[in-house]
Each structure stands twice: as structure tokens, then as C-alpha cells.
Amino acid sequence: MSAVSAAPAPAPAPAPAAAPVRARRARWYRQPTLMAGLVLLAIILFMCYGAPLLTTFNPDTQNLLQPLLGVGQGGHLLGTDQEGRDTFARLLYGGQVDLRVAVIAVIFPFILGTILGSLAGYFGGWVDAIIMRIIDIVVAFPFFVLVIALVFVLGTGEKSIYIAITAVGWVSYARITRGEITVAKRQEYVLAAQSGGLSSLRIIGRHLLPNVVTQSIVYAMSDIVQDILAIVTLSYLGLGIQPPTPDWGTMISAGQNFLTTQWQLTTIPGLAVVITGLALSLVGDGLADLLRTGTS
Amino acid sequence: MGRMSFVLRRLVLLVPTAVGVTIITFFMVHLIPGNPAVTILGQRANPTTVAALDGQLGLNQPLIEQYWLFIDRLLHGNLGQSLYYGVPVSGLITSRLPATLWLLCYAAVIAVAISVPLATLAASRKDAVRDHVVRVVPLLGLGMPAFWLGLILQTWLGVKVRLFPVTGYGQGFTGHLRSMFLPALTVAVALCPVLIRSLRASMLGVLGAEFVTTARAKGVPTPRLLVRHVLRNAVIPAVTVLGINIGYLIGGTLIVEQVFAVPGIGSLMIEAIFERDFTVIQSVALVYGVLVVLVNLLTDMAYVALDPRVRFDA
């Protein structure tokens, strides 16, 4: 946003430009979707990262004398799993792992996609043609197919998850950024920067990107949801987070053998994924609404 | 430009994408860290087996030649030999493909059957309670792991209520229809949020059009107006959205097939992952890529067929 505030002339001019910004700032907490999402997300983050305050059990401590306890039995809020580990503790600590991996997994494709998309959008011509052809090829593969195949090929573990998701996920950011930059590069402030003799890299980095990156940030919210799903799915298949590290996917996978007797082992971690997804989707939707009303 | 040349043009544009798809699947084996043959066979494999696999995968030849060999085989319908089953991969895939295609079509039908009424309900009164409910509830589907929903449906509707078979593909058309209902519903749930959202948005757009005002002024009853005038026009952008998300839909079948033991190419791929059967994984990924490209082509065609206003020179 620094480019926006730096661009207009000194005294009287900023009024029309500043008004919507101020209105937007004043309005964000009145956006019900955004607020609901943020509150839900805050609760989830507090529960996961405040886990030591909420449970005294260690998520990894086995108690083979008390396996598969039901809800509330033996002082275990959500019972225990087949190895006697506290389900509630594993749920909270598992959330830490999944959220951390999902957020990190969004950063790399965001950066790569934004760079490639801005190059394609700004320079056009053959640079654009090549990048767009690569995008066409990557999107020809279903997301899960390519991610699962890549993680299999690269070997299980966190690093492979990051590489696989980056290799597949960058295309959306590239498409968004390219589209925005293709429009924005014809605007006067860019023409002014160009005639001022600034280098292309500086124009993209300092002038264009700060103005177009918000769309990608909004998209990143829904992308985190997709990444959580990918991580949980990979873990369910045994390709993602490796035991004994707690994670929602392995919890669902381990609990499925006891689904008819101990429903909570599978149902609760799945619900955790759904609720986290809902929170992030609400935040994404709210941000998008905010930007739409802010710009119109 | 005529209809025929539009189709031809689309087909020609497919060529670079199809070549790209083969390049990516070809290079997968080279992403394997270390010696791919050793990684595939495991550290304790004896050198003779490793050398044999090197030969079979063509890993002992220069890269360009390896790719030519790969393409040459592909054009002859030869996807290689399964490392685990020891039979040609093409045979495995052709025997498994019908179940996947069934699942896909069934899921698309269910998704449309759920989305159209809900989107109509939401768009019929913007910002009313029903609109908010229809907008928020499907968001739950966005973050729902397909395999988890599958397990839950399986337990409740399959094991406890015994309404539907728990696993399998079923016999004959009605058998498939019954057996594949739960897997298809699971796949459809992931697609509905996107579909409802786009359909609602385009219906709201159409509702503002002048011909709708005219129809209202003529006294066309609201239900009839929504179905005959609004929905017909709003469905076209929704088909595009369905087409764009078809890759996601197809990817969703992978894990759902595994959960419901549907004998499709998705469960074949996951079995292959457990057995470290690289040639099968590579081939199934290739088939999925081709499938998405073909379905995208079909969506383009459907778009043209649905809307006579679409011009062929796009």
C-alpha cells in the first residue's frame, strides 16, 4: 500500500483517494462473514497453540492398559485411541502440525506464482506464451493426482509436501497476478514510472505488485483450505505427516477401523478439518467482499 | 468460422498440452532421488534386478532417447509392464476405466441435482435468510476431506441403516446406480459449493436483465420465471465453472474410489503407491491428464451447443 499513499501529490489531492481507504478500515469489523471467520479462526488457533492450557495429557504418551476409552471415560475428554493416547490432546497438537504445514505450503506457491505471473503479465510476448503453456499443462492434471504422484516420487515427509504443493499450486497465483498486471500496467502511474526510466524489475516490485497482490492474498485463504485437505489426504494414505507425530489425517486413518464402536476417533478430527476449512473460507469470502465494496 | 473448424481448432490446440502432459509424466521417474531403480525396488534389491528394471524403464539410455522410447510405446498403446502385477499396464487401465467414468458422470449429475435447486432458492430472494443459509452451508463442503465424508456416509447409510452397499461397483445398470450412489455423492459434495456459488451469481445477474423485467411485467409467475427465463440463461456460465473445476472433480474420485473400494483407476493408483509400482502410477497420472484435457474439450463443445449466441471464433 506504500505505493498508493506515496503516489498522489501533497496537500489537497489525497482526499478522494483516502476516503475509501478510511471507509474500508472503519467497515471491516462490520463485515459479518469476515468477523465470523476471524473469530472462528482465533478460537481454533487458541485451542491448537494453547493446547498446554487446555489439556494436561501428552499427545504421544501411550497407555496400553487403557486403549479405546469412550468419550469422557478415565478423565479423557474425547477418550483414547487404540494405543491409549488421549484423543483430545492429539487433536489439539495435531492441529498445530497441520496448520503450520498448510501455511508454509501456501507461501512457496504464492511467491513462485506471483513472480512468474507478474513476468508474464508485464512483459507479455514470448515470456507470457511460455508461462501460459506451462500453466495449461500443469492444470491438465487433477490437483490430487499430481500431488500424490509427486510425493510418492520424492519420498514421504514434510519437504516433499512443500515441493509437490508448490509445483502444482503456483499456477493459480500466476494466473491471478498475470490477469491483474495485464490491466494495471496500462495505468498512468506505471506509464509515469516507465517514462521516468525506472527498471522493469523496480516497476514490477515497487509499483505494480503492491497494487495487485491483494487478490492473491484473498485467494491464498481458500488455498490454505485446499492445502489442509491435501496434507490430511496424504497423511490418510500414509504419505504425509509420519506417525507418531499427531495429525488429523493419520488420526482419521487410524480411527476408521473402530468407526462403529468409537465413532469419535474418526469423526472429531474430520470435523476439526471441516471447521478450520469453514473459518478460512469465511475469512476469504469476507476479504473478497470487503475489497469489492472498497473498490466499487 | 463454422462449427467444424472450431472443433478442429480446439483439437489442434490440444496437441501442445498433450505433449506437455507426456513430458511431465515422463520426467516423474527422474525426480526420484538417487537411482530410481534402486528406490523403486528397495535398498536390498540385487544388482541383476536393478539392471533389468533400468533396461525396462530405459534408464540406461540418453534422456532424449528415453523420451522417444516412451512416446513410441505410448503411440502403440503400450504403457509398459506393471512392476507388481506383471501384466501390461494398458490392460489394467482399460479394465478399471469404466468404473471411474461412471463415478464421474454420476457425481456430476448429483452435483447438478443438488446445486440447481439450492442456487435457485438463494437467488430467488437476495440477502434473505435462505440466501445466507445457501451461501454459508456449502462452505462446509469446501473444507471437507472427501475420504472422511466417505467413511461417515459408509458407516451411517451403509452399515447402520443399510440403505446402500458399503463398497464395490455393483452388477448391471441398476446395480451400479445403487452401489455408486454413496461414492458419487461424496465426490459431488466437494463440487457443490463452487457450483452453487457460480450459479447463484449468474442467476442474480440474469435477474437484473431487461427481459426478466418484461416477463415480470407480463405477469409470468415467479417459479416459471426462475426456471424458464433465468435458469436457462444462467446455466451457461455454470457449465464453464463445472468445466474449469472438472480437474478438481476428477482428482476427488481418486481417494473416494479407495474408500469405497470402487475398482477404478484412482484406486488402482493408490494400490500402486502401496506396492511401489512406478509404471502404473506414471500411466494413471498420464490417463488422468488426458481425461481432464478431453473433458475440457467436451465442456467447450457443450458451451457451444447450449448457447446459440456463442461465436466460433473465440
Image (tube, rainbow, N blue to C red):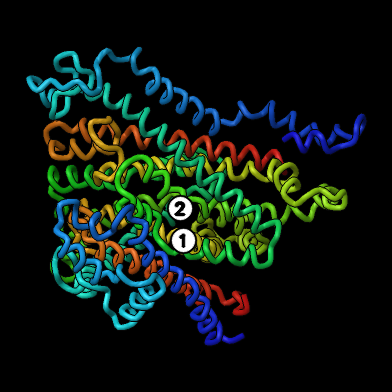
Assess whether mark 2 and mark 1 are in contact (beta carbons under 8 angstroms): yes
Where A5 falls versus B158 (above or below)?
above
- The residue where tag 2 is placed is A167
Mark 2: which secondary structure?
A: helix
For residue A210, which quarter of the picture?
top right
Tag 2 subunit = A
Name the residue: 32% across, 25% down: A93
Q: Position of residue A21 (x, y in %)?
A: 74, 32
In this rendering, position of residue A204 left or right of residue A97: right
Q: Residues within 10 Å of mark 2 (few under 14, many from 20)?
A: some
Q: Amino acid at mark 1?
A: Val
Q: Quadrant of the N terminus of chain B?
A: bottom right
* First of labels 1, 2 by sequence position: 1
**Amino acid type assigned to the residue bearing label 2 in the image:** Ala
Q: Position of residue B167 (x, y in %)?
A: 15, 55
Q: Could you tell me which quadrant the C terminus of chain B lies in?
A: bottom right
x 32%, y 24%: residue? A92
Q: Is residue A49 in view?
A: yes
Q: Nearer the viewer, mark 1 or mark 2?
A: 2
Callout 1 environment at 10 Å: few (<14), some (14 to 19), or many (20+)? many
| A140 to the left or right of A269 | right
Q: Indicate left or right for B11 with B143 as reference.
A: right
- Give the residue pinned by disc 1: A138
Distance between the alpha carbons at the discs numbered 1 and 2: 8 Å
Mark number, residue B11 = none
Name which residue lies at 90% across and 36% down: A9
Q: Residue at x 35, y 42 (%)?
A: A231
Give the camera-side residue of A234 and B79: B79
Could one spot residue B181 in this view of the protein? Answer: no
> Which quadrant of the structure image shows residue A26?
top right
